[in-house]
Image (spheres, grey):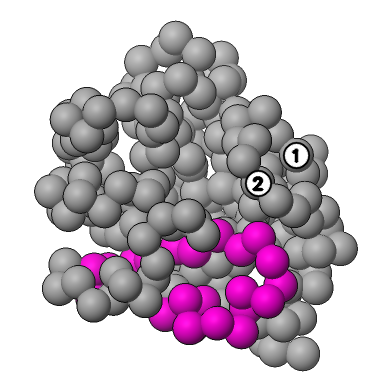
Amino acid sequence: MTLKSSFPYQLYLVISEKDCLGKDFLKVAEQSILGGVDIIQLREKNISTENFLQKALALKEITDKYNIPLIINDHFEVAEKVGSAGIHVGNNDRSPSSLRNDLFFKNKMIGYSIEYLSQLEGVNTELSDYLGISPIFSTQTKKDTVTEWGLEGLSKIRSLTDKPLVAIGNINSKNAASIIKAGADSLAIVSAICGSENPEKAAYEIKNEILK
């Protein structure tokens, strides 16, 4: 069994304007940082590159203010133009091995979503900085996933790799501790923070569960 890697970003917010349910997503992002979020990923689907870039630039002003890394989901052009800390990709996006050949991404953080155990043995996993285990539990915010891993699946992945594991999928303050215990280095949250009436409090409560 491999040893669990350290990963400095324990609470990972995945945000989009849609998931904020009518609230100002920039305010939600700032409140979440004040509550304990360590890193933020902007995940926008079905919008133009120009619109995505505008949102990313506005969000980066906030993340820079608090020295929080900004990760861009999928869109390598936006990631490069905004000067993000990194990018997160899945099996249907540009691969980590391809990104590493790009001068901009050579030393940037790259996250890679795991849908099959066989991916753990591939070059893309080797070249990634962390692995997104998605979803732990099924969720309405992301319906294009292949495997619902559950705690048992997460523990299995933990036994097979020493890469940092970022768990995502219907995570909240009630199940956070069990997911960390099962092997996650970091919890990626969407609805439990973005959809909360008080994002700062929601982030604070989940962070406290991680730190127990």
Q: Is residue 47 placed above or below 68 in the rendered structure?
A: above
Residue positioned 40% across, 22% down in the render = 17
* Location of the N terminus (image quadrant): bottom right
* Coordinates of residue 97 in the picture (x, y in percent): 37, 76
* Coordinates of residue 2 in the picture (x, y in percent): 70, 89
* Coordinates of residue 129 in the picture (x, y in percent): 44, 73
- Give the camera-side residue of 8 and 107: 107
Q: Is residue 42 magenta?
A: no
Mark 2, other Cα within 10 Å: few <14 / some 14–19 / many ≥20 = some
Q: Which residue is mark 2?
A: 145
Task: Provide the residue span drawn in magenta.
Answer: 105-127
**Left or right of residue 140: residue 6:** left
Q: Tell me the SS state at disc 1.
A: loop
Residue positioned 36% across, 15% down in the render = 24
Q: Is residue 65 visible?
A: yes
**Left or right of residue 126: residue 100:** left
Q: Which residue is mark 1?
A: 138
The residue lying furthest to the top in this view is 22
The residue lying furthest to the bottom in this view is 1
